[in-house]
Image: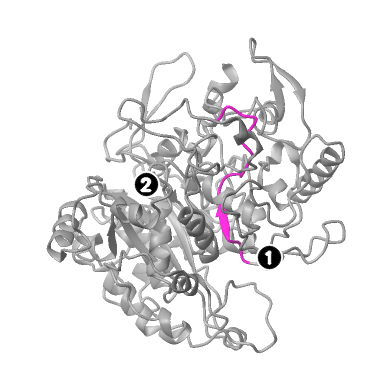
């Protein structure tokens, strides 16, 4: 209990006045973009990067008010990364963002006097934010940059597309990426071979009845500006709104579509919103026999991809995720890391957390992981490493893998296959085999055995009783949290599986399809922090373990090499998930909301073990000139829910 409650407050104390004086007094514009329009850039890409209009009515290459700023340093005594790493992904770890430098361009501090905030270069103009049309700005930006993209990827999207299931040939064409379009920044090409740039849609998942708070809108402004407008349309951001009333005629009546949009989405976000409902999917995937978004979260992405084939990749994003750094930098570095990964032993690396205090440097971690996996496999402690597709042997009809056949044997491959190959699926937490764990949803499987599926009733909405002895034979992978990226081929494979009735719980479905179809799936170990003081030995015992367990005492018994987090002592078991409560990225954690609020200087509740609760943060807490305000590097946080400014507790 002491270890669980021993808090590390250093991150809250990472204040602006702990920076070097020269650094603190001189925030600089942060522009982590490619060197657009240089001779080397032009050799690789069609068209030119053209500056776009921003929310202040000025061109973004001329408007310093729209620039994110950073301080070139980190406050002294800043805590180390707990899992993953900046250097691993290629993210900048030598700059920090405070709330003004990060969100000033998007409305934070509009109601404050700049002279009352030390070392803040405040915007000189303030837009009428509710009147900003983010959708029109994105469409205008795409038009200015249209020569960079293939002809069929240059037009604004159709907001109410067809809900008719396309014929197989039409679907295959929509899911394909033309050969004249790049699949990634790192792909291998002949010298001088120009391509059109790929495009990525960001779908921020919302629903009718969602309460949009001030910071939700601020964060969305940042995403649109940094990902879409400043990149010249490489990304496009949408609010993807689930209409819970399946009978609402949103696809047949413009009046009803507009009415629901107006009643449920703030004015500023309406022209980036796309409405959808579950009513589409009984007609598309009748053999699944379940279409609830809770279980089948990605059917709507398959529909989006088929009806918007101009996008080569789709990110599924959540309204309660936040990134304290620059979005473009994060998204690009995550995809580049994934592209660089060789396929050999990739699934085995995917299952394991990189814990610097336990494993040392990342290369040592990788080498030791490979060594352990190969030894465990040779001694039949774990199955052979994945090499190529692993279709389900009893599938009716048989699975037809969409992934490639390995070019050689695993033994002959020198970690070359897959390098510079774009990832079909990217997660931000590991992918692991749940079969020997007690993870609650591991048997939520539809029709992998004909007509064997969970049946939900008003009295039993979870169908916790549902299982089948054959499920032990189905090799599958789980990941936690649905902030993930899909390629079109990944969505095609899921679509084709749903057509014949097969499916699984959302956090087990795309990763399993990738495994069975031989698609490239990558866990990107971005930096995660912990608000606990935990010794390396305790960290290892909780998050890097694989042992059977005494059912009566809970004591770890026999360890199984190479099966990290996949045994009865898995940290994902619900009786052990409390260990994640101090993580900066985990759905069950309390830390992200507190950290984010305190960074904004909004009040939070702090409590030391054995002491009463106390309020930290709020007006006056950061000094007379806000000189004690937090300054932190780019950090991905989730969940950040119920963010009313003066609501200390969720």
* Residue that carries the numbered disc 2 in the rendered image: 291
The image position of residue 444, as x and y in percent, is 49, 37
Q: Which residue was labeled with disc 1?
A: 404
Q: Quadrant of the N terminus?
A: top right
Residue 534 position (above or below residue 371): above
**Res 586 seen here:** yes
Report helix, strand or loop for mark 1: loop
Find the distance from the CA under tag 2 to the CA under tag 1. Answer: 30 Å
Tell me what residue is drawn at x 65 percent, y 10 percent. Answer: 553
Q: Is residue 296 left or right of residue 258?
A: right
Camera-side residue of 226 and 429: 429
Q: Is residue 381 magenta?
A: no
Q: Is residue 428 magenta?
A: yes
Q: Is 453 left, or right, of 398 in this rendering?
A: left
Q: Between residues 262 and 596, which one lies in front from this camera angle? A: 262
Whether residue 299 sits left or right of residue 476 in the image: it is left
Name the image quarter holding residue 119.
bottom left
Q: Position of residue 603 (x, y in %)?
A: 33, 35
Crowd tier of the residue under label 2, counting other residues whose Cα lies within 10 Å: few below 14, some 14–19, many 20 or above? some
Residue 593, image x and y in percent?
A: 40, 38
Pick the quarter of the image with the C terminus: top left
Q: Position of residue 443 (x, y in %)?
A: 53, 34
Q: Residue at x 55, y 56 (%)?
A: 95
Which region of the structure is painted magenta? Answer: 422-439
């Amino acid at each position: 209990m002491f270890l669980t409650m021993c808090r590390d407050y250093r991150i809250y104390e990472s204040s602006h006045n702990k920076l070097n004086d020269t650094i603190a007094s001189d925030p600089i514009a942060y522009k982590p973009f490619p060197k657009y329009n240089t001779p080397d850039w032009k050799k690789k890409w069609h068209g030119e990067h053209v500056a776009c209009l921003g929310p202040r009515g000025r061109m973004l290459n001329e408007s310093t008010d729209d620039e994110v700023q950073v301080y070139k340093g980190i406050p002294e005594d800043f805590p180390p990364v707990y899992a993953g790493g900046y250097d691993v992904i290629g993210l900048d770890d030598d700059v920090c963002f405070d709330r003004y430098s990060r969100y000033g361009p998007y409305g934070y501090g509009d109601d404050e006097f700049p002279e009352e905030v030390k070392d803040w270069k405040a915007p000189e103009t303030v837009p009428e934010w509710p009147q900003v049309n983010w959708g029109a700005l994105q469409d205008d930006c795409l038009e200015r940059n249209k020569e960079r993209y293939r002809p069929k990827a240059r037009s604004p999207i159709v907001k109410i597309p067809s809900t008719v299931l396309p014929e197989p040939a039409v679907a295959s064409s929509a899911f394909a990426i033309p050969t004249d379009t790049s699949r990634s920044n790192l792909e291998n090409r002949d010298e001088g071979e120009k391509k059109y740039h790929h495009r990525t849609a960001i779908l921020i998942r919302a629903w009718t009845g969602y309460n949009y708070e001030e910071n939700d809108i601020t964060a969305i402004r940042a995403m649109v500006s940094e990902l879409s407008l400043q990149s010249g349309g490489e990304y496009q951001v949408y609010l993807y709104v689930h209409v819970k009333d399946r009978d609402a005629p949103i696809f047949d009546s413009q009046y009803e579509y507009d009415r629901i949009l107006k009643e449920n989405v703030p004015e500023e976000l309406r022209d980036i919103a796309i409405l959808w409902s579950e009513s589409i999917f009984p007609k598309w995937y009748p053999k699944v026999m379940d279409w609830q978004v809770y279980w089948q979260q990605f059917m709507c992405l398959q529909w989006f991809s088929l009806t918007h084939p101009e996008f080569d990749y789709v990110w599924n994003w959540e309204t309660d995720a936040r990134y304290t750094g620059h979005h473009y930098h994060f998204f690009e570095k995550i995809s580049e890391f994934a592209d660089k990964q060789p396929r050999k032993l990739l699934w085995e690396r995917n299952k394991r957390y990189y814990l610097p205090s336990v494993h040392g440097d990342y290369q040592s971690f990788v080498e030791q992981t490979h060594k352990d996996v190969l030894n465990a496999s040779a001694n039949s402690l774990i199955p052979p490493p994945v090499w190529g597709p692993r279709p389900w042997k009893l599938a009716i009809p048989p699975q037809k893998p969409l992934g490639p056949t390995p070019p050689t044997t695993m033994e002959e491959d020198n970690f070359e296959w897959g390098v510079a190959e774009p990832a079909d699926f990217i997660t931000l937490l590991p992918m692991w085999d749940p079969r020997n764990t007690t993870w609650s949803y591991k048997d939520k499987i539809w029709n992998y055995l004909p007509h064997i599926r969970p049946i939900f009733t008003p009295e039993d909405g979870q169908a916790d009783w549902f299982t089948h002895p054959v499920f032990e034979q189905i090799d599958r992978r789980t990941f936690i949290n649905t902030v993930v990226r899909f390629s079109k081929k990944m969505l095609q494979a899921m679509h084709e599986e749903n057509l014949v009735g097969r499916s699984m719980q959302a956090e087990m479905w795309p990763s399993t399809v990738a495994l069975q179809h031989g698609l490239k799936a990558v866990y990107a170990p971005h930096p995660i922090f912990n608000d606990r003081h935990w010794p390396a030995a305790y960290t290892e015992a909780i998050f890097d373990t694989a042992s059977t367990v005494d059912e009566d005492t809970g004591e770890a018994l026999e360890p199984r090499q190479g099966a990290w987090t996949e045994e009865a002592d898995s940290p994902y078991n619900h009786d052990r998930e409390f260990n994640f409560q101090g993580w900066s990225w985990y759905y069950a954690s309390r830390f992200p909301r507190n950290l984010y609020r305190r960074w904004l200087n909004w009040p939070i509740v702090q409590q030391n073990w054995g002491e009463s609760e106390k309020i930290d943060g709020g007006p006056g807490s950061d000094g007379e000139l806000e000189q004690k305000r937090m300054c932190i590097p780019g950090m991905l946080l989730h969940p950040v829910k119920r963010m009313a400014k003066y609501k200390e507790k969720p």
